Image: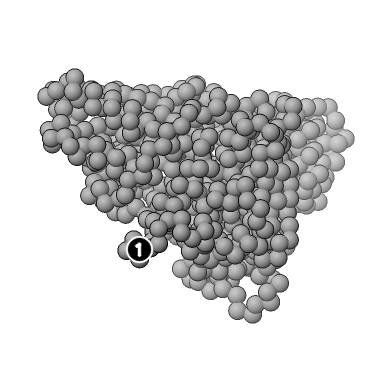
Amino acid sequence: MREVHTKSLWYDQLERPHGGSQVVASIRRLAAILAADAAGYSRLMGADEEGTLDRLKAHRRNLVDPKIEQHRGRIFKTTGDGVLAEFPSVVDAVRCGVEIQRGIIDRNAKLPEESRITFRIGINLGDVIIDGDDIYGDGVNISARLETLAEPGGVCISRVVRDQIRGKLPYPFEDLGEQNVKNIARPVRAFAMSAAAVSATPLAPVLRSGPAPRSLSANHRIAAAGVLAIVCCGGLVWWVSPHGNSPAVGVEPAATAMQKMHREPANDTARLLSIVVLPFQNLSNDPEQEYFAEAVTDDLTSDLSLISGSFVIAPMTAFTYKGKTVSAQQVGRELGVRYVLEGSVRCIADQVRVNVQLIDAESGVQIWADRFENKRANLARAQSEITGRLARRLNLELAEAASRRVERSGATSLDAEDFLMRGWAAYYRPASTATRQESLQAFERALEADPQSVAARIGIGTVLVDDLVLRFSNDLERDKARADEMLREALEREMSDSMAHFAMGMLRRIQNRLTDSQIELETSIALDRNNARAFQQLGVTLMCLGEPELAIPQIERAIRLNPYDPNIASYYWAVGSAHLVSGRMDDAVSLLTKARAANPRLYFIHLWLAGSLALKGDLDAARFAVAESLELRPEINSLARWRAENLFYTNPQFTALADKTLYAGLRQAGFPDD
């Protein structure tokens, strides 16, 4: 009975805050969650209560806790025989889980069978809710359910985790298929590594270190990370090499060994988007800031690996270059990458400043540089925001650079991957009918070159939906149907693409399926915490659901992540609109004016601005804004026609707010009901 009671208590605690006001006030973020508990704990306690407890504590003290710390994890809940820990990296979480299980095997070797403690471990990547030092949400709940699917001594992971570690860890996970688990609405695709497979994995040593500095969370790199990275690299070289013929580790230079491990990838896309993030320099003459510099390097590497088609050198390899004076060309040759990212961190007074430069590894030419600043008071938050902004900006720059390289090559027989690069480069430029047509044509040619391409379908669906939102489409019903078809086919083949869920979220809102839109956009964010456009679109959907106060922080997060987005007009419009229906006219006028200045070609911005200006009493300016809207879209000449084209504006909760604000202001500005 004790084990059943413990499980019930654990799950009750995990699921406690759903639907309450506490969730609204809490912080959300993407995290890798590891859940572990002792199998057959009740039986063991019944046979030898004191001995079992002593052995469990010894496992925790000498293996489990040090392994979690070694891999930059943080234990946020313990429940008798169970542990829940969060990690900033999926790779770290899975490596930690397997190494814990392997260590338990060795620790149990000298014990009789009836006295051995074995663990089940489940790992998931998902959106979680931070409440003080505790964490809740489906991201946590799914990891706990996966733990129950693991065999004693084994590890079970979700599909999104499997997709993130594929090609990065040498662990054999078997597909368990779709699993229906308690209190989770959708089936979970699970993958398992058996106890037998774990036992065949070489054991990595536990390296102890002091606690992480108080200025950063325990998730960040420990002080000995540089040394640890080199040690781990040596171990990894040994692991991936044929042991019988390999020279001893250390016989050849580390760079040569790394070159063998990371030869230039075979496909063209990886070559176009291959990059290494070299360790950021700490220019503050403050050893404590070394943690910050290393955390920026590591998290940025993880974020860039989410870019579709990217080839990103692992941090443990990149850290072998720390403190060395080498050219970008040399690094590129040794690691087989197209781009090298260098950076530095400096703390000045109450500010933290990060300088970065992106270098073409073939020519050594700097192709982009920027500087990012944030408040020093909360370094953990500053680090998260800076790396998020940097990852999004690099996504744009890499797509543009790859597109320019294809154009310069003068190739006459471009393949699907070349067209994909050109499609995304055009998509990220300022929105217009011309740029969107260019983007769509490139994605269509990618699909012609590779009819099985999931990425081409995602590109086509994304452009079509965006054109529907911005009213660039010439045939709304045709484009809705094509976008739905493309995105459905893409998600049937690949469920873990953030952009696919982002586009589907917008499409569901256009179809007036607002709850489905919210789910898709939240999934997109869970898969890529730096998808600024998903945050912005989630805010729009929440506003249409009648929740503008919840919408505003989502859109503000998007602006912080991507303040220089070529399509920033949509961000300012979204947050200005949410302020308008919330009744804050000063903020609405200011933000909607910025939106109009950023892109005056979008007719709906003029209508929203007209409503806010009228409610402020500036009727002349409001009438002028209505006239500008009619010049762009003369057929949208009444509230009835506007709402008929945008069914999501007819949601009763939104209409109740808009009748008192937006619609009232437009009527004052002379915009008729019918």
Residue 102 placement (x, y as % from top left): 29, 43
Q: Looking at the figure, which quarter contains the C terminus?
A: top right
Residue 51 appears in the picture as rendered: yes
Residue drawn at 11 percent across, 24 percent down:
47
Neighbourhood count class around disc 1 (C-alpha, 10 Å): few under 14, some 14–19, many 20 upward: few
Query: In the rendered view, would you say 376 is above or below 241?
Result: above
The quarter of the displayed image where residue 122 is located? top left
In the rendered image, the residue lying farthest to the bottom is 412
In the rendered image, the residue lying farthest to the top is 50
Residue 213 placement (x, y as % from top left): 55, 27
Locate residue 430 relative to residue 515 in the image: left or right: right
Residue drawn at 52 percent across, 25 percent down:
26
Residue drawn at 55 percent across, 24 percent down:
214
Residue 287 placement (x, y as % from top left): 62, 32
In the rendered image, the residue lying farthest to the right is 620
Residue position marked by numbered label 1 in the rendering: 242
Q: Secondary structure at mark 1?
A: loop
- Amino acid carrying mark 1 in the image: Pro
Q: Looking at the figure, which quarter contains the N terminus?
A: top left
In this view, the residue in front, 80 or 285, is: 285
In this view, the residue in front, 358 or 84, is: 358
Locate residue 254 relative to residue 422 in the image: left or right: left
Locate residue 562 relative to residue 259 in the image: left or right: right
In this view, the residue in front, 578 or 663, is: 578
Residue drawn at 39 percent across, 45 percent down:
95
The quarter of the displayed image where residue 35 is located? top left
